[in-house]
């Protein structure tokens, strides 16, 4: 991994939103601290830090197909309405002025956003993924990014899932086929050169 180039890399902090962080339970505070440390390491190395969140306007809710099992229920509950406290990025990871925020209306970070265009404009070819849930946004983004030929790292201890066993299987058995799965401490060493 000695060829890691911070200037061509981006840390994606995905779905660290108030209500979603709350679903992590008692490990939420430690997860947020690790995500903060990852962002600090990325910024110190000159890497881009970018945020991805899921939120819906009334038009977005109306556009969700009733066949979409996951998102049709959101349309009825108005669970993640854009502008609500629940849909806001958690205060512990509030985006800095130079940190882009991409709002999506589906699971993956590339879906329904301008993320790919922004990465291309900045010459970024390597992504470092952190987020909630491991089986949701992290999995979907990793698969899509791998198909788009990005070099990928997953910060296993900066991701969380409501099901610890699903998180373990993904980070230990599934993700390594397409990404380097590392811990925060490994990333801090990597980013510092």
Image (cartoon, rainbow, N blue to C red):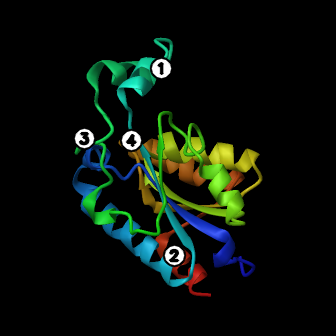
Q: Quadrant of the C terminus?
A: bottom right
Circle number at residue 163 = 4
Circle number at residue 63 = 1
Instruction: Give whichever of discs 4 and 1 has the lower sequence position.
Output: 1
Asked whether the beta carbons under mark 3 and mark 1 sit within 8 Å of each other, the answer is no
Cα–Cα gap, marks 2 and 1: 36 Å
Mark 4 burial class by Cα count in 10 Å: few <14, some 14-19, many 20+: few
Instruction: Give whichever of discs 3 and 4 has the lower sequence position.
Output: 3
Mark 3 burial class by Cα count in 10 Å: few <14, some 14-19, many 20+: few
Determine the image quadrant of residue 81: top left
Cα–Cα gap, marks 3 and 4: 26 Å
Q: Nearer the viewer, mark 2 or mark 3?
A: 3
Instruction: Give whichever of discs 3 and 1 has the lower sequence position.
Output: 1
Instruction: Give whichever of discs 2 and 1 has the lower sequence position.
Output: 2
What percent of the width, then of the height, locates residue 31? Answer: 34, 62
What percent of the width, then of the height, locates residue 173? Answer: 61, 49
Is 1 left or right of 91, judged from the image as shown?
right
């Amino acid at each position: 991994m000695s060829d890691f180039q911070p200037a061509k890399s981006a840390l994606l902090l995905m779905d660290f939103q108030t209500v979603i962080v709350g679903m992590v339970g008692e490990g939420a505070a430690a997860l947020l601290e690790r995500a903060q440390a990852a962002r600090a390491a990325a910024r110190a190395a000159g890497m881009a830090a970018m945020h991805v969140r899921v939120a819906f306007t009334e038009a977005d809710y109306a556009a969700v197909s009733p066949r979409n099992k996951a998102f049709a229920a959101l349309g009825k509950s108005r669970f993640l309405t854009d502008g609500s406290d629940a849909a806001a990025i958690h205060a512990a990871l509030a985006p800095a002025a130079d940190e882009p925020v991409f709002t999506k209306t589906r699971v993956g970070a590339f879906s329904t956003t301008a993320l790919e265009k922004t990465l291309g404009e900045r010459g970024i070819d390597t992504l470092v993924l952190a987020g909630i849930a491991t089986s949701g946004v992290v999995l979907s983004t990793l698969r899509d990014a791998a198909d788009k030929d990005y070099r990928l790292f997953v910060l296993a201890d900066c991701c969380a899932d409501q099901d610890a066993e699903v998180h373990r299987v993904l980070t230990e058995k599934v993700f390594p086929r397409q990404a380097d799965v590392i811990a925060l401490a490994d990333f801090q060493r990597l980013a510092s050169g």
